[in-house]
Image (cartoon, rainbow, N blue to C red):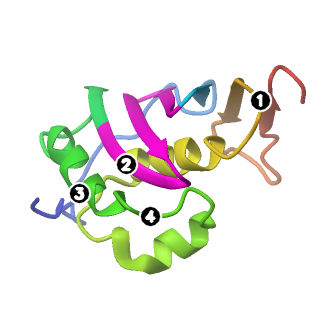
Amino acid sequence: MRPVVYPRDLKLPPNPDFGNGFAWRRIELVNEPGRTTGHLADTFHEMRCEVAHGEGRVRAISGTMIRYPTTLCPGASEPLQALVGRSIHEAPLSLYRFGALAGHCTHLLDLSYHVISHATRSEPVARYEATVPDEVSDPVPCEVRRDGEL
């Protein structure tokens, strides 16, 4: 996977609607025996991740990019294979230190860590929703909900 290069000298006009909008993200995690799935949708992305697990370990993992901003994104599921064999009880920070960041899509990698973590929980479904308004002043009043609760 090639790194994305963003030119720093782009002279883009300001978005005339900035200050009137917001970014949003929804994540749904679903547990089934031996399998946990996640779906992420936000302002720019939509993706799914599925983890098969057994005996406390990741047995198989797959990622599907549905809506994405760059041509590099569809190849993002391949590097997830480095997580096969890892403990589902491992802290996400430990998995980051494991070096799995190299070559990954940040969003799909983060979703995979949420899915792996959810595999250890007894609750069948968890839903997260966040909205962040355009930053026009400090502080920015963000809203995050889990299962509908603020």
The amino acid beneath tag 4 is Arg
Please determine whether, in this image, residue 22 is positioned above or below residue 119.
above
Say what secondary structure mark 2 lies in: strand
Q: CA distance from mark 2 to mark 3?
A: 15 Å
In this rendering, the count of numbered labels is 4
Quadrant housing residue 99: bottom left
**Foreground: disc 3 or disc 4:** 4
Mark-to-mark CA distance, 1 and 3: 28 Å
Q: Are marks 1 and 4 in contact (CB under 8 Å)?
A: no
Q: Specify the segment rendered in magenta.
A: 34-62
State the quadrant of the C terminus: top right
- CA gap between label 4 and label 2 equals 8 Å
- Residue ID for mark 4: 86
> What amino acid does circle 1 point to?
Glu
Dots 3 and 4: beta carbons under 8 Å?
A: no
**Label 3, on which residue?**
79
Q: CA distance from mark 3 to mark 4?
A: 14 Å
Asked if residue 9 lies left or right of residue 132, the reply is left
Point out which mark residue 123 bears: 1
Identify residue type, mark 3.
Pro
Q: Which badge, 3 or 4, comes first in the chain's sequence?
A: 3
